[in-house]
Image: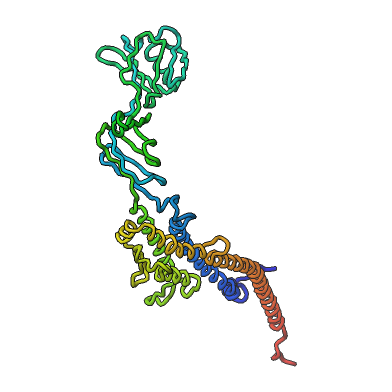
Amino acid sequence: MVSIGAVDGLISGMNTSQVIDQLMQLEARPQTMLKAKVSKENLIVAAYQAVNSKMAALKTAAEAFTAPNALTPTNPTWQAVKATSSATSVTATATTGASPVSLTFDVTALAKAQVTTASYASATATATTGSSVDLTVAGTTTTINLTDTSVQGVASAINAAKTGVTAAVVTTTTGTVLQLTGDKTGAANSFSITGLSAATTNIVTASDAQITVGDPASGGYVVTSATNSFTNLMNNVTVNVSKLETGVTMTVAADPESIADKMQALVDAANSALAQVGTYTTYNSTAKSGGVLTGDYTVRLLRDNILSAVSNGLAGYGSYKQVGVDLDKTGKLTFDRSAFIVAYNANPASVQNGVSNGVATSLSKIAKDATDFVSGTLTTAIQSGQDQVKDLNNRIADWDSRLQMRQTALKRQFAAMEAALGQLKNQSSWLAGQIGGLPSGNSSGN
């Protein structure tokens, strides 16, 4: 059979390839429409996913107040505390469970690591009385065998043993010093060494840090720590000291500022969700077009529910203005931080009720109903859209096969047409030749 390439315009003078392309474009119109539907549906699914992400963030922010036992003393949000110190050299960090308290004390000692030295004539001098030294750290003795008994050799062997003591060879104005330094502070981390040929001197004694509360001789007490960090002075409070101080006052108190931070995060999350919905549902009067979710009931209901949850307040409690939360005229949530802190300081239980049993619970439920992994309205919408895209793509794939078959058929038809035209042309030429060979009708009969 003659191929299209061989017959393209050869007999008929037609641009056969172009004609087939144009016919195929008409044939492919149903598939093109399906592809357009896929593109539109993908935009819708992406929009649902973006809104879902914002609603999930809103759920997380709300759950900071609605977690189990939100009104009990164990809830981290409402038990937020902050520790402050009257001295810059003393800092403290309070965690959940710390009780409000004020304590005055003196920092009477800082934790120190032991430093021991031994003097020699030079770094190459023999530093030991034998081929090993015994190093006892925090009650544990380690025998360190030596292949080099010089001062430098002993230092290198001690460092390689990693016993908790670091050795250094120091050149001084009077000679060479083997300096041994404990890796950890505290009296329990003291060390001793035997086997050196030179006498040792403790120039710094390992000692604990000390905090003294009142007069130990009259009911006061001393608290010690192997480091300059104390975790045993107050429950769930870590105190760090850096210099000796007297009359330091440490105060642990409720921290409404941190609670207000979480309230701001809740309001911001709600506004972010509302803004995301607005992005996909707002009609642009200039472009005369709407977002991909314009008129969508699912997201419109989410927006309305969030706004209603805030505007309706809590039955038996009243408006959420009491905790600083309100709506402005644009339909955006606002948060008055100062009003919240004033209200909390005046009546913590009332504020907890208004937030945990009110606005946070309402917003958490709205967000959960939308994002639930199994039955969430947005989850369902996303899954439905993805299923539709899958179905459309399957139909598009079916059209690929059908269009390929149609194109092959068209090529055969046009090839056959060119071949037929070629045969007709050959027959026409033969017939013309035959006619041309007939005797002339004007010949004489004589």
**Quadrant position of residue 404:** bottom right
Q: Position of residue 269 (x, y in %)?
A: 41, 61
Residue furthest to the front in view is: 218
Residue beneath the point at 48% across and 54% down:
69
Residue furthest to the right in view is: 446
Does residue 46 appear anywhere in the picture?
Answer: no
Residue furthest to the top in view is: 129
Q: Position of residue 107 (x, y in %)?
A: 29, 32
Residue beneath the point at 35% across and 62% down:
323
**Quadrant position of residue 37:** bottom right
Q: Position of residue 10 (x, y in %)?
A: 61, 72
Total numbered labels: 0
The front one of 103 and 368 is: 103
Instruction: Determine whether 329 is above or below 358 in the image.
Output: below
Horizontal relation, residue 445 to residue 253: left or right: right
Instruction: Determine whether 28 is above or below 154 in the image.
Output: below
The front one of 334 and 425 is: 334
The front one of 219 and 225 is: 219
Residue beneath the point at 52% across and 68% down:
39
Q: Position of residue 281 (x, y in %)?
A: 44, 72
The front one of 94 and 193 is: 94
Horizontal relation, residue 129 to residue 408: left or right: left
